[in-house]
Amino acid sequence: MSDEWFHRFQYPNGTLKNKFDIQNHDQLQKLEYEESAQNALALLQIRPDIKDISSLENIHKVLFGEIYSWAGEYREYDLHKGTTTFLEPNFFEMAAYAINESLKKLYHVNNVKIREYADLTDKLNNLHPFREGNGRSARLFLQIFAANNGDYLNYSRNDSEMIKALSNANIDKIASMLQLSKFGSPEKAFDEIIINRMNELQNANEAKYDDPNIGSK
């Protein structure tokens, strides 16, 4: 990212610029986790129906809109993390089309296989359209999409292994780190997501954010 984009999005110490003007990284990370987790629960209560990739922008805005002014906006610049280079913005339209084609084939289908969800996870990770919060937005997007099919899609909390699998676009490895439960109805699947996310939030609060995985992107 160029100096121009760095100064647009970050304070001199590297902390992301935010609506609260919090410049302490750990303090911002705690707020970001808590707000995004609570906002995810509020969205799940609505039980939205996801048909295409456009819902990803809304999910990102719901999760992070209270903290970042750019929430829900696709990036206009190249993005690199470590040795991983994500999709260039001029290819977003093509990637979105491919994702939509996959979603169309699996929409309200009751026999979706775990590898098909893993493939979508990989496609969304490669897209990586936002400055931050891509992982949480993509996971919630796919959990909701799966719930529409009566499925509960659970992601491994071993973030380092999942990141490695995603970096290598290893669909089989990604699939091995997902858990798929067939509930047969969207209502039951949504209930399961809500219960598990409420438990995660409660456990995180009790641990006082000591878990290093909590702030994962």
Image: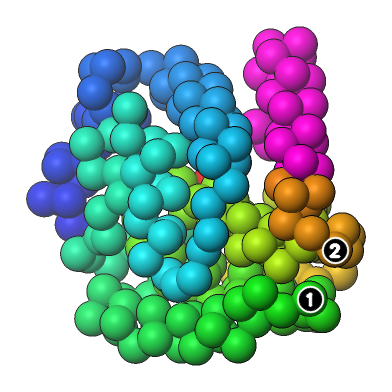
Residue 120 placement, left or right of 109: left
Label ID, residue 207: none
Rendered view: 7 above or below 211 = below
**Which is more toward the observer, 144 or 129?**
144
Can you see residue 21?
A: yes
* Circle 2 residue: 184
Q: Quadrant of residue 106?
A: bottom right
Q: Quadrant of the N terminus?
A: bottom left
Residue 180 belongs to magenta span? no
Other-residue count near label 1 (Cα within 10 Å), few / some / many at <14 / 14–19 / ≥20: some
Q: Which residues are magenta?
A: 191-214
Q: Position of residue 176 (x, y in %)?
A: 86, 69
Label ID, residue 110: 1
Q: Secondary structure at mark 2?
A: loop
Q: Position of residue 94 (x, y in %)?
A: 34, 88
Query: What's under tag 2, amino acid-wise?
Result: Gly
